[in-house]
């Protein structure tokens, strides 16, 4: 059965869509690692599966993710297990489980990997998708918020992605949110029967979730709701201004959006999103994040702050393709070896092994092609050198090496082949 599961996709060496080519993914992933490590974030890898309760407590049981989108099953021991729908909850679980909070702080981690959500497939949105995430624990300093935001912007810049904009907001401390909840309930109650069903269900549980409703009529009603800025505490206001000042210092352009609330319940204080135009996509958000000062404690650790973001790599890749960003080509084949019979094939295996151990890429024919057909393969692979091993060469312990760029060809002793190609390649 060759049909792929709905909402999934393969990443191939070659594909009609550039963003599904391995080389594009390697470019994005290597750039992410380079930038994250430059900011002194260390890579962490966590399981694809976690106990479902982690996401209910961490992500929030009023979110679309938990209510509608998780892949959840019961294991043989009767435990509820879910494929991770996002990365932060698992990272926090690891931070708490390994008692990293007891070590000197701050802790700065990053991760990349697949996530899973059962949602309607559309441009840039798949049921298996990949995230780059960064998480920093142990500091309330708003400068750290700004640094995290700046890391994301530098990542986009080094990819060559243009037109990325940051929208920021402050979603308040618990006291501010409590006041804002009351104001939102008072505002939405007269419209209750007009709201979408999921918005009605959230009205008294978490009315902030209504603000980012995808239902058009509910969204229109929400546009008239009071702004959270009217209900922020002095500390939250000061925090927002400090983050903005640090972003100015770092040269990060941003827009303040007081309707921005994010789709996860764990955010406190700073919230932000990265935006870029992707034709055909429902939204132009390619990533976002914020502070989650209560999440470590919610997962069983001490009262310790955190801040981070997640970026959807599929959306980044689609934006790169749309903007016609030039992605580095795969490394060229150093040497293609042409053989003719069993004796030359056996010797070629020895020579190929020597080339590869020396750090050179090398290949030969395995389909008994004629010499002309083998040369076509070498051209297709864009080989720098073609090494021709015939009966005469074998008898003389030499091999004919042709430089495919200059057209020059000469006989090279077997024991000098590695040095010859290394030298000529470096010219």
Image (tube, helix red, strand yellow):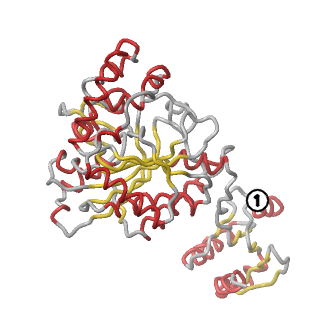
Label 1 sits on a secondary structure element that is helix
Viewer-side residue, 261 vs 20 = 261
Residue annotated with mark 1: 380
Q: Which residue is drawn at 78% across and 84% down?
A: 411
Q: Is residue 410 visible?
A: yes
Asked if 113 appears above or below 180 in the picture, the reply is: below
Give left or right: position of 173 versus 412.
left
Pinpoint residue 2: horizontal percent, then vertical percent: 55, 33
Give left or right: position of 124 versus 230.
right
Around disc 1, counting alpha carbons within 10 Å, would you say few (fewer than 14), some (14 to 19), or many (20 or more)?
few
Pinpoint residue 18: horizontal percent, then vertical percent: 65, 48
Q: Residue furthest toward the top?
A: 193
Pinpoint residue 133: horizontal percent, then vertical percent: 40, 53
Viewer-side residue, 312 vs 189 = 189
Q: In which quarter of the image is residue 171?
A: top left
Q: Residue at x 76, y 78 (%)?
A: 401
Asked if 400 appears above or below 280 in the picture, the reply is: below
Viewer-side residue, 45 vs 351 = 45
Give left or right: position of 296 versus 423.
left
Q: Quadrant of residue 115?
A: top left
Viewer-side residue, 45 vs 74 = 45
Q: Quadrant of the C terminus?
A: bottom right
Q: Can residue 71 be seen in this view?
A: no
Number of marks in the rendered image: 1
Pinpoint residue 140: horizontal percent, then vertical percent: 26, 59
Q: Which residue is drawn at 19% across and 34% down?
A: 79
């Amino acid at each position: 059965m060759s049909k792929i599961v709905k909402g999934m996709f393969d990443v191939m060496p070659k594909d009609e869509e550039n963003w599904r080519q391995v080389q594009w993914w390697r470019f994005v992933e290597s750039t992410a690692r380079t930038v994250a490590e430059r900011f002194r974030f260390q890579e962490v890898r966590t399981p694809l599966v976690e106990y479902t309760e982690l996401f209910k407590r961490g992500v929030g049981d009023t979110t679309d993710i938990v209510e509608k989108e998780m892949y959840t099953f019961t294991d043989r021991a009767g435990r509820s297990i879910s494929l991770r729908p996002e990365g932060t909850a698992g990272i926090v679980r690891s931070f708490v489980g390994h008692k990293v909070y007891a070590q000197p702080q701050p802790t700065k981690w990053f991760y990349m990997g697949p996530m899973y959500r059962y949602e309607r497939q559309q441009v840039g949105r798949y049921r298996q998708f990949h995230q780059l995430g960064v998480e920093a624990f142990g500091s309330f300093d708003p400068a750290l918020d700004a640094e995290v935001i700046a890391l994301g912007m530098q990542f986009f810049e080094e990819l060559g992605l243009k037109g990325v904009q940051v929208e920021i907001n402050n979603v308040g401390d618990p006291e501010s949110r409590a006041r804002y909840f009351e104001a939102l309930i008072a505002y939405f109650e007269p419209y209750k029967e007009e709201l979408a069903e999921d918005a009605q269900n959230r009205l008294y549980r978490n009315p902030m979730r209504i603000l980012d409703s995808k239902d058009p009529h509910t969204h229109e009603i929400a546009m008239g709701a009071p702004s959270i800025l009217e209900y922020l505490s002095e500390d939250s206001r000061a925090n927002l201004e400090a983050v903005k000042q640090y972003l100015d210092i770092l040269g990060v352009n941003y827009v303040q959006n007081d309707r921005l609330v994010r789709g996860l319940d764990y955010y406190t204080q700073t919230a932000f999103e990265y935006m870029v135009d992707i034709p055909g996509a429902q939204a132009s958000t390619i990533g976002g994040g914020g502070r989650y000062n209560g999440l470590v404690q919610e997962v069983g650790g001490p009262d310790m702050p955190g801040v981070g973001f997640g970026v959807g790599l599929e959306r980044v890749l689609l934006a790169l393709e749309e903007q016609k960003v030039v992605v580095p080509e795969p490394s060229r084949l150093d040497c293609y070896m042409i053989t003719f019979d069993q004796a030359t094939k056996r010797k070629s295996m020895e020579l190929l092994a020597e080339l590869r151990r020396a750090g050179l890429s090398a290949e030969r024919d395995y389909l008994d092609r004629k010499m002309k057909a083998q040369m076509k393969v070498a051209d297709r692979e864009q080989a720098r050198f073609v090494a021709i091993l015939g009966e005469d060469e074998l008898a003389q312990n030499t091999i004919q090496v042709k430089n495919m760029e200059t057209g020059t060809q000469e006989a090279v002793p077997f024991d000098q082949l590695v040095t010859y190609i290394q030298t000529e390649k470096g010219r």
